[in-house]
Amino acid sequence: MARKFDAGYYFSEGFHSIFTHGFMSFAAVCMIVACLLIMGSFSLLAVNLDHMLGDLEAENEMLAYIDENYTEEQARSIQPEIETLPNVTKVTFVSREEALEDYKEGRENNPLLDDLPDEVLRDRFRIHVENLEQMEQTEAAVEQVTGVANVRAAIDIANGFVLARNIATGVAVVLIGILLVVSLFIIANTIKLATFYRREEIAIMKMCGATDAFIQWPFVVEGLILGLTGALLAFFAQWGIYQMVAKLIIQGNGLSLVTMVSYTSMIRYILAIFCGTGALIGVCGSLLAIRKFLQV
């Protein structure tokens, strides 16, 4: 006769099985913690690189120098054409006088600059772009505008950030796939040990008419508990490691330009992802382990 769903019984049996095979349960939790920490670290690295790339996109600019034979009025007339180019978000005109003042800033004690005429510099446009990955194409488009003599853009720096972000993202995705499989294997073997230990009991329950679901649930609960325990431990460990790294970066003079996303601003998402992944690993590992023992 099929037995009704009894959560208390399932949780009691699940907890009992965890402590019966304490070492394997401990190994499974440690493996989940290690896997989630590695996955989380690379994922957070990708998130921070993407954040820094966004900041760089917001602040990064290219300079378009105008033909020296153009008057200021003629130079200003080019601005609408540049503003219509793809990937351009903001265009600011800088006159020769303003460019000279900017150049003199911080060099007030240099007497050679006192009588420097405005004509040595050119009118220019500061051009902000939306997407650094398209910066090279944007530079080429600006160079085609009539009246633009040349363009200066930090293409190598932009490409370096994009490459670093893409590599971190790719590594994170590959590691997530590999470590998920490893975690499933560890959980499945832990549950398999419990089912092997109780194989005669399972066979008797099957012969007495117990449903597969009734037999499976305690093992599913066991896997779920192991997965969530590992996920919570990994979450707090990741928090501590992240805060420590952020503190070191703030204190490091050489890394003053590096900014990190606040962990607390992502805390709900990280907790949900860790718990969801841990629960999925635990439940799937349990189902894989118990499946063959149900074939009596």
Image (cartoon, rainbow, N blue to C red):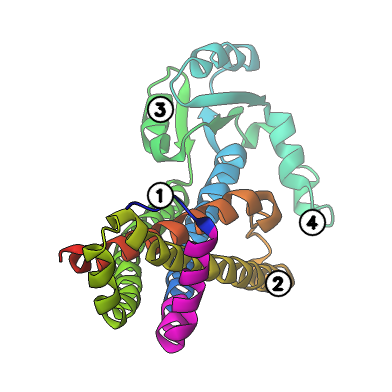
Q: Secondary structure at mark 2?
A: helix
Please report the residue visible at 63 percent of the width from the left and 60 percent of the height from the top: 258
Q: In the structure shown, which secondary structural element does the residue marked by tag 4 occupy?
A: loop
> For mark 2, what is the residue?
253
Labels 2 & 1 near each other (Cβ < 8 A): no
Q: Give x and y (percent) for residue 49.
A: 51, 54
The label nearer to you, 4 versus 1, is 1
Hey, what amino acid is under mark 3? Glu
- Distance between the alpha carbons at the discs numbered 3 and 4: 34 Å
Q: Position of residue 151 (x, y in %)?
A: 46, 35
Q: Considering only order in the chain, which callout, 3 or 2, is on the residue closer to the N terminus?
A: 3
The alpha-carbon separation of the residues under discs 2 and 1 comes to 24 Å
Mark 4 to mark 1: distance in Å?
36 Å
Give how far apart the Cα atoms at labels 3 and 1 are. 19 Å
Above or below residue 294? Residue 195 is below
In the displayed structure, would residue 89 be above or below residue 131?
above
Label 3 sits on a secondary structure element that is helix
> Is residue 10 a member of the stretch shown in magenta?
yes
Q: Nearer the viewer, mark 3 or mark 1?
A: 1
Q: Name the kind of residue labelled 2 in the image.
A: Asn
Residue found at x 35% / y 72%? 187
Q: Quadrant of residue 232?
A: bottom right
Q: Using the image, tell me which numbered label, if any, was put on residue 159.
A: 1
Looking at marks 4 and 1 on the same chain, the residue that comes earlier in the sequence is marked by 4
Residue 143 image label: 3
- Identity, as a three-letter code, of the amino acid under mark 1: Asn
Q: Is residue 42 visible?
A: no
- Residue pushed farthest bottom? 23
Which of 88 and 252 lies nearest the eye of the viewer? 252
The answer to which of marks 3 and 4 sits earlier in the sequence is: 4
Residue ID for mark 4: 110
